[in-house]
Structures are given as C-alpha cells and as structure tokens.
Image (cartoon, grey):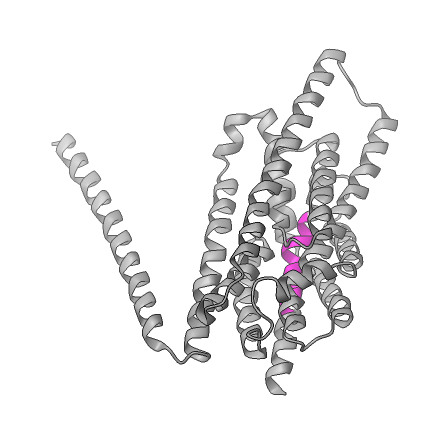
Amino acid sequence: MTLIIVCLLVAHFFAFNVGASGSAATMGIAYGTGVVKKKRIALLLSGAGCMLGALWGGEVVETIGKGLISSDLLTIQAAAIILFVSAVTLCFTNIIGIPLSTSEVTVGAIVGVSISLQQLYLRNLLEILSFWIIIPAAAFITTFIFGILLKHYKSKYRFLPSKRMTKILSILLVLTGFLEAFAAGMNNVANAIGPLVGADVLSMNAGLLTGGLFMALGSVFLGGRVLETNGKKISYLSLSDGVVISGTSGILVLGASIIGIPIPMTQVTTSAIVGTGAVKDWKGIWENKVIHQIVKVWIASPMISLVIAFCLTEVLLQSNFYTVVIIASGIVATLILTNFGRGAIVNKSKHHTLKEEF
C-alpha cells in the first residue's frame, strides 16, 4: 500500500513537471511576440488547454502503459522505477530552463526496465522512434516553406499589415497556441500516468483527470523559464510566423496523439521555430548556442533515463549488482579519459603559446 501511495505521488509530481516542460512551451510564441504580454496569462492559457487535452489522451496512455512492455512484467515496482527516473530527469531540465521532451525520458526509462527484464516490444519502439524523426522534420520543413512563401509575398507586394490584419493574426496566434497546448495535454499526460494504468494501479479515467490537473498546475507554477526559452531566446518571430509555427505543431502532435504515438512535443515546436528562423538567417540560427544546448539535452536525456532505469531494475528487481558495477566503471572510465584528453589539448595549446612567445 505504501508503494502505491508513493507511486501516485511520484506520478503526479511527474505530471506537474510535464506541464512545466511541455505545455508551457506551447504559449511561448504568443508570449514572445508580445500578443500575450503577461507571463502569468500565457501560463494560465497553456494550463487550461493542457487540462482539456489530457482528457482525450487515452490512446497514448495505452501505448505507454502496454505498448512497449508486457503488462505481466509492468508491476508496481517497475512502474515506480519508470516514474522516478522520468520525474527526476525532467525536473532537472526544468530547473535549468531547457524544453525537454517528456516522451523521450519516459520511453527511455521504459526501455531500460524492459531490457533488464529481457522483454521489449522492439517493433513498437522502432515505430515510435521513426515518428520522433519524421514529425519534427515535417515541422521544420513546413514552417521553412511557409516562411519562404511569406517572405516572397511580402517583398513582391510590399505588404504592410493593417491594424485589422494585426488584430486577426493576434487572435489566430492565441487560438493556435491553445490548440498546441491541447495537443500537448492529449499526448503528454500518458507519460505520467501510463505506467500506473499499465500496472492496473490507476484507472484510465481517473488518471486522465488527475494527470491533466497536475499538468495544468505545473504549467502555471513552474513553466516560466521554458516559456522564456521558447519565446525569446531562439529566434525573433512575427505574428504570421507564430500562427504557422503553433498551427503546424498543434496539428502534427494532435494527429500523432489520435493514433497513439507519444511524440516529443517540445522537439516539434522548437523544430518549427528553427524552420522559421532559418528563413531569416540560415547560418545564424544554427550557430545559436541555445539550439546546440537543446539538441544535446534531447540526445542525452533518453539515454540517461534508459541507463538509470536499467541499473535500478537490475539492483532492485533482479538483485544483479555485477552488471551495474560494470556499467558504472565504464562511465567513470569514460569521464576520466574525456577529462584527460581535454587536459592534454589545453597543455599542448599552452606549450605552443610559450614557444611562440619565446
């Protein structure tokens, strides 16, 4: 009973962080363009959209709960490991303000547990991974093409937006941002409650309701930094850019949710922003340090959650300490060699400098 209570607490703490990371990013464009001037209002709109979308997230919950690992192996202990690893990883990235995909850390943790228990639905995993590449790429290409067309139209006809047009675009931007938040809730609520539904600890309806509520709360109270990152630190966006980005991201993630694919929402949104920014400054957008940092976190986070979940499962469920010792030794050795290599490069650089001065 105690473990069930702990799992419920961790799951909803995770949902809180899911809201901060995913749904808060959905209103970043409206906030960044100044349509929604107050951060708190943007976060409230994001939370409301997320809460409504979560109520329709059943298909993705099925995939997370039963699509990657057998329900016979997804015990309450295994679910606890998945939720703990996912929540801690996501909480860390929220603190540093990086928009991380909750789907990545959750799927990574499930795969880690599945590998340890020696049963993984590999075909389903490969299908999910393919969508992780296709959907963000589609978002980038779509917004890039729209950006080129808009740029051509504005330059050819010397388009100057009227007050009426500006008002219409502002309304559309808020609506498409709300759509994006709805899609985020629909897709991401599964990451928090899916393992417990799969382990028959929580019913689907109760999980969708409480998970959605905590996601909304997370968006409101912890989403500020992610909102700033997506809205103001990646690329300057016009109103028309924002409508295209939010509309594209919302529709793509909504489609993935309907067929039950857990999709990296923040990757889709950020890829769409980069696609628009590339039209204005192709070289500069790729040199943006924020983009580099986000990509590094995207690549590293699922691998980190996979390794940690695997190690915890080996120790707590399989009582196999030897594998964990080997993995830990390999990680320590890699870190030592990496630092040694950096030191050698620095020393070599200093040697050349002294030689030149002499």
Residue 201: x %, y % from top left: 67, 78
Magenta stretch encompasses residue 257 = no
Quarter-of-image position of residue 116: bottom left
**As drawn, which residue projects farthest toward the left?**
358
Q: Residue at x 45, y 60 (%)?
A: 304
Considering the image in quadrants, where does the N terminus appear?
bottom right
Image-based side of 36 in relation to 70, left or right: right
Residue 19 in view: no
Residue 275: x %, y % from top left: 60, 32
Residue 114 in view: yes
Q: Magenta span covers which residues? A: 13-25
Whether 146 is drawn above or below 289: the answer is: above
Q: Residue at x 30, y 62 (%)?
A: 330
**As drawn, which residue projects farthest toward the right?**
164
Image-based side of 83 in relation to 213, left or right: left
Residue 70: x %, y % from top left: 57, 69
Residue 317: x %, y % from top left: 46, 79
Quarter-of-image position of residue 49: bottom right
Type of secondary structure dominating the magenta stretch: helix
**As drawn, which residue projects farthest toward the bottom?**
1
